[in-house]
């Protein structure tokens, strides 16, 4: 019996090693990893540039409290403002913490900057925002909330891609909207461009903060630094985590200058937030993506894999559609996906579920065309029987 809480239904694979685009189990079986640790190890396992940066940081400073100025934190924050269009960055350690910070900022902004009695945050069905009390309340999936009541008051969840539902939900108490541009855990569901632009316009007009959860879509996953950059919108708050540190735990909540003014000294904090080791990994990750022209590669590989999947499954009536953006891909089935994910794994390909009927692929950005062919072949073998 395991001494661990039974909070995960784990796969029957004991992983001991990761290198590049592959994982190995205790029996030395090799797996092509199209999960990337759920969108985390985006440059593959142990990317050399990140490894080198962390090794260098190990020799200098592991931890230092935020009572000090920490130059490497400043550097990463500056870099993140360059790529995001935000002006200020708060570092934390996970996605849930980044969203928690965003929800706190929204309320504080309404109450202390706008000086209005606003506190409601609008979120959407099928969303996923984390497992803390505030973020599970914000999550639009009952299975995440079940048994944890009373939930946080002041969070309203409405249908996604539905303008009239949104117009009906907005009121004098609304301080912010929190949404994923492409819902990850909920099934790889992209926002409709027109809907998102209309939501943005209403937010702007009513001084409601538009907060985009880019924890899964951010840091290049969809072929731009952030998915919202393909929608012609400018959010007030952006949250990131997963892919930011290439596997080192780090999250960030970023905001426009005016919004950030709600958080003064003492309003929020985290002991480990902006830990130098994690920051060194993140800084190297961002630089590598930039210097090696990886965003363009993600776009190209994304088109390639979607095209190959469409060709492979054009005559397969188990499959509803192929969807996604960049290297965030969903194969929407007309039936449960679990059996096919298991079959693929047994053949050496690791893929994820997203909701009951979607096979989600989050390959590393370093995936090769040969590996894409291999993966499509394995999925074909699993699904075309
Ligand atoms: C994974 C995820 C989170 C939660 O991140 P944790 O690091 O697990 O807390 C929040 N939002 C989205 C969109 C995610 O994909």
Image (cartoon, helix red, strand yellow):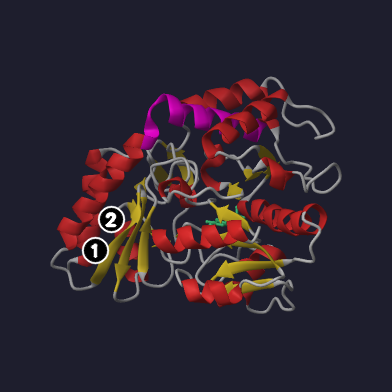
Is residue 167 magenta-colored?
A: no
- Magenta span: 277-295
Q: Quadrant of the C terminus?
A: bottom left
> Residue 56 appears at what percent x and percent y?
61, 20
Q: Would you call the spot at circle 2 few (<14 residues within 10 Å), some (14-19), or many (20 or more)?
A: some
Tell me if residue 75 can be seen.
yes
Q: Quadrant of the N terminus?
A: bottom right
Q: Is residue 147 above or below residue 84?
A: below
Q: Which residue is mark 2?
A: 347
Q: Which residue is mark 1?
A: 382
Compare residues 250 and 259 and report the one nearer the observer.
259
Q: Earlier in the sequence, mark 1 or mark 2?
A: 2
Q: Would you call the spot at circle 1 few (<14 residues within 10 Å), some (14-19), or many (20 or more)?
A: some
Tag shown at residue 272: none
Callout 1 secondary element: helix
Q: Residue at x 70, y 20 (%)?
A: 60
> Residue 181 appears at what percent x and percent y?
47, 57
Instruction: Check if mark 1's residue and mark 2's residue have beta carbons within 8 Å.
Output: yes
> Residue 14 appears at what percent x and percent y?
47, 53
Q: Is residue 316 above or below residue 282?
A: below
Is residue 286 magenta-colored?
A: yes
State which image quarter holds ligand 1: bottom right
Q: Residue at x 31, y 52 (%)?
A: 348
Compare residues 59 and 148 and report the one nearer the observer.
148
Q: Residue at x 73, y 53 (%)?
A: 105
Magenta stretch: dominant secondary structure: helix
> Residue 279 appears at what percent x and percent y?
64, 33
Left or right side of 92 for 43: left
Left or right side of 376 for 182: right
């Amino acid at each position: 019996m395991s001494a661990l809480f039974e909070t995960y239904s784990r796969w029957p694979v004991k992983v001991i090693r990761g290198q590049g685009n592959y994982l190995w189990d205790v029996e030395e079986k090799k797996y092509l990893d199209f999960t990337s640790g759920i969108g985390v190890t985006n440059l593959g396992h142990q990317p050399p540039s990140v490894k080198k940066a962390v090794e260098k940081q190990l020799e200098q400073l592991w931890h230092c409290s935020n009572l000090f100025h920490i130059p490497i934190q400043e550097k990463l924050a500056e870099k993140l403002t360059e790529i995001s269009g935000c002006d200020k960055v708060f570092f934390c350690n996970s996605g849930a913490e980044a969203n928690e910070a965003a929800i706190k900022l929204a309320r504080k902004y309404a109450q202390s900057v706008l000086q209005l009695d606003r506190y409601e945050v609008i979120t959407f069905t099928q969303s996923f925002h984390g497992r803390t009390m505030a973020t599970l309340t914000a999550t639009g999936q009952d299975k995440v909330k079940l048994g944890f009541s009373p939930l946080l008051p002041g969070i309203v969840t409405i249908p996604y891609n539905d303008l009239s539902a949104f117009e009906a939900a907005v009121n004098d108490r609304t301080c912010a909207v929190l949404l994923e541009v492409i819902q990850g855990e909920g099934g790889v569901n992209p926002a409709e461009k027109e809907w998102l632009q209309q939501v943005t316009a209403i937010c702007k007009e009513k001084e409601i903060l538009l907060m985009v959860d880019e924890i899964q879509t951010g840091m290049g996953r969809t072929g731009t630094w952030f998915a919202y950059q393909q929608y012609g919108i400018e959010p007030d708050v952006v949250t990131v985590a997963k892919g930011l540190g290439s596997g080192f735990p780090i999250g960030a909540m970023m905001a426009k200058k005016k919004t950030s003014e709600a958080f003064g000294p003492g309003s929020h904090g985290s002991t480990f937030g902006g830990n130098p080791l994690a920051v060194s990994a993140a800084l190297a990750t961002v630089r590598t993506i930039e210097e090696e022209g990886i965003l363009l590669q993600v776009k190209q590989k994304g088109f390639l894999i979607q095209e190959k999947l469409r060709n492979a499954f054009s005559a397969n009536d188990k499959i509803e559609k192929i969807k996604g953006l960049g290297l965030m891909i969903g194969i929407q089935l007309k039936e449960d996906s679990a059996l096919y994910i298991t079959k693929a794994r047994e053949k050496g390909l690791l893929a994820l579920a997203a909701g009951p009927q979607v096979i989600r692929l989050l390959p590393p950005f370093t995936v090769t065309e040969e590996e894409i062919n291999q993966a499509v072949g394995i999925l074909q073998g699993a699904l075309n029987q």
